[in-house]
Image (spheres, rainbow, N blue to C red):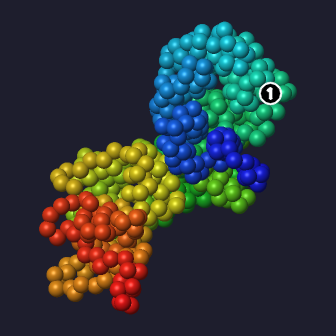
């Protein structure tokens, strides 16, 4: 893209295709942070004018959702492409749909779509026939592996196919044939050189089915995979291991101390100040864990090669790869939201009184409450029914948390990727809160609410906004137009709540009635001419 821009090539569509390819490469190499909003914006902008390009960006969004393990969202996007593209393009998007159905566990649906794709492209050239063959092979690999092996092996040799499609065929061939990467043709094996785990996750299938394949390609001898961010999980050779909470804590301690821990050291780390827990209790719990995971005695140590998401995060940070570290972390959002929004809510006296209820946030499978009466951010309690709630895709809230977005109204809500509920009438304080998620913005709102409490006797003040002289305060709720007002043509809009006024007449464009008009003295240059005359 840098080279393209240096040459000043005047071809907007070609640059958009290049941008989409760059985004796809970022996903396959584990650098997808911050891509979703860009891709969504471009897809929406292109939908009505360049539908084929819009489909390409939607396809990249499918890859992004697959890399994050969001199968349901990926299926919806893939079906949208199949419904909107022309017949000639359906072979390509049928492969994408089959891949998402496999990820979601809908193998009958994958078989149905895979057979249809093969039939649809049977009489086409090598490229489209190859796409249909890979789609059929993917569906067969997890249901009839012996039938999938020859189809996928032949498809790998189709050099007309894109590299990622040949990689996908190879991944499913290895799964169906039970072979490792050393069995692949050399020209196919080298295609995997730059792929990360995120790329393998995007192109293959459910982790439970492809764990051994990934391990072979990544060159890892790890037999035990541990995850501690979010819900604690362990997999032995790709098979989930059932863990108790204490078992997960023991694994965390031992994975952080590869040299081992004595019984006394492990006891001290697990049970602060002893907590009345006898050493024999620890021995019993280690013994139960040992039934599932090899743990040595004297000292306690994990008895096989292992890796964890915590270790990977540390390695990324040690390498200075902060973005990569954020990609690894997929833990709960509550601690971050509490540290960010908690102080803002606690100090927002007028806002808390104006909302006067709990506001729920649902981000994926995590449920959080902004408790305005108590002034805190806390977990959503069982059976609780907040007066207001919003449901967002987890990635949107994670991005807002990462970037500390101060205005969710013009970002998360404007994306239209949310559900909302309220008991009772519209509450303007809720709307204003989500535009004021910084200490500076909330301080301004709180000062405004304090000042408007006695606004009746305030003298009229005039200010200049982009060449127009208008009264200082918006007639709606008194916001300072010299701070939050913007002018486009002959319309001024108050940024606090979106009220707009005609600068020629002062009339409010959002509402009618007494007290809604804005007092306008006119354009500043005209006033200067009048004074000079």
Furthest residue in direction front, as rendered: 533
Is residue 331 visible in this depiction of the protein? yes
Q: Going 23% across and 50% down the picture, which residue do you hit?
A: 422
Seen in the image, is 223 located left or right of residue 472?
A: right
Dot 1 falls on a residue whose secondary structure is: helix
Q: Quadrant of residue 141?
A: top right
Q: Residue at x 82, y 33 (%)?
A: 190
Indicate the position of residue 337 as horizontal and vertical percent values: 43, 60
Residue 222: name its quadrant: top right
Residue that mark 1 sits on:
188
Q: Position of residue 36 (x, y in %)?
A: 54, 47
* Residue 176 picture location, percent across and down: 68, 18
Question: Furthest-left residue in view?
Answer: 514
219 up-or-down from 259: above or below: above
What is the tally of numbered marks visible in this picture? 1
Q: Residue at x 28, y 85 (%)?
A: 461
Does residue 335 lie above or below 97 as drawn? below
Q: Foreground residue, 247 or 319?
A: 319
Quick one: which residue is furthest to the bottom in this view? 532
The C terminus: image quadrant:
bottom left
Q: Residue at x 35, y 59 (%)?
A: 378
Name the outermost residue toward the right: 186
Is residue 345 positioned above or below 43 on the image?
A: below
Quick check: 161 left or right of 84? Answer: right
Q: Is residue 266 above or below residue 467?
A: above
Q: Is residue 152 or residue 60 the one in the foreground?
A: 60
Task: Tell me if residue 341 can be seen.
Answer: no
- Whole-percent x, y for residue 140 in the image: 61, 14
> 10 Å neighbourhood of mark 1: few (<14), some, or many (≥20)?
some
């Amino acid at each position: 893209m840098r080279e393209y821009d240096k040459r000043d090539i005047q071809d907007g569509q070609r640059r958009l295709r290049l941008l989409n390819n760059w985004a796809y490469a970022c996903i396959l190499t584990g650098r997808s942070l911050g891509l979703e909003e860009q891709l969504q914006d471009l897809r929406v902008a292109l939908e009505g004018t360049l539908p084929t390009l819009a489909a390409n960006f939607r396809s990249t969004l499918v890859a992004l959702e697959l890399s994050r393990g969001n199968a349901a969202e990926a299926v919806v996007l893939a079906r949208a492409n199949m419904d909107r593209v022309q017949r000639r393009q359906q072979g390509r998007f049928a492969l994408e749909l089959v891949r998402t159905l496999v990820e979601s566990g809908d193998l009958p649906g994958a078989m149905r779509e895979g057979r249809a794709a093969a039939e649809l492209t049977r009489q086409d050239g090598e490229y489209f026939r190859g796409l249909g063959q890979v789609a059929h092979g993917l569906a067969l690999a997890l249901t009839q592996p012996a039938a999938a092996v020859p189809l996928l092996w032949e498809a790998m040799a189709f050099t007309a196919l894109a590299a990622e499609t040949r990689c996908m065929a190879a991944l499913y061939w290895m799964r169906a044939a039970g072979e490792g990467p050393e069995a692949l043709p050399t020209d196919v094996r080298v295609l995997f050189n730059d792929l990360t785990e995120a790329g393998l996750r995007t192109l293959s299938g459910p982790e439970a089915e492809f764990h051994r394949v990934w391990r072979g390609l990544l060159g890892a001898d790890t037999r035990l995979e541990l995850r501690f961010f979010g819900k604690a999980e362990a997999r032995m050779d790709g098979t989930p291991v059932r863990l108790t909470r204490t078992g997960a804590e023991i694994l965390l301690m031992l994975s952080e101390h590869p040299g081992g821990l004595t019984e006394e050291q492990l006891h001290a780390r697990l049970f602060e100040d002893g907590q009345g827990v006898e050493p024999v209790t620890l021995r019993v719990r280690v013994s139960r864990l040992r039934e599932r995971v090899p743990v040595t005695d004297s000292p306690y140590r994990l008895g096989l090669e292992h890796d964890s998401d915590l270790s990977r995060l540390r390695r990324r940070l040690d390498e200075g790869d902060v973005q990569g570290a954020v990609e690894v972390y997929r833990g709960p959002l509550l601690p971050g939201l509490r540290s960010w929004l908690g102080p803002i809510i606690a100090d927002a006296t007028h806002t808390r009184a104006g909302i006067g209820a709990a506001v729920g946030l649902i981000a994926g499978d995590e449920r959080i409450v902004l408790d305005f009466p108590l002034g805190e951010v806390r977990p959503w309690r069982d059976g609780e029914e907040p007066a207001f709630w919003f449901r967002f895709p987890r990635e949107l809230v994670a991005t807002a948390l990462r970037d500390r977005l101060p205005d969710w109204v013009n970002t998360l809500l404007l994306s239209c990727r949310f559900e909302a509920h309220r008991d009772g009438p519209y509450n303007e304080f809720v709307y204003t809160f989500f535009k004021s998620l910084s200490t500076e913005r909330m301080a301004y709102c709180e000062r405004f609410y304090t000042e408007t409490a006695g606004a009746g006797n305030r003298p009229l003040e005039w200010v200049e906004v982009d060449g127009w002289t208008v009264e200082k305060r918006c007639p709606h709720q008194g916001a300072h137009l010299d701070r939050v007002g913007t002018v486009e043509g002959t319309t001024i809009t108050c940024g606090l709540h979106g009220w707009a006024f005609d600068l020629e007449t002062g009339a409010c464009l959002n509402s009618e009635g007494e007290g809604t008009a804005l007092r306008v003295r006119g354009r500043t240059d005209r006033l200067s001419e009048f004074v000079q005359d």
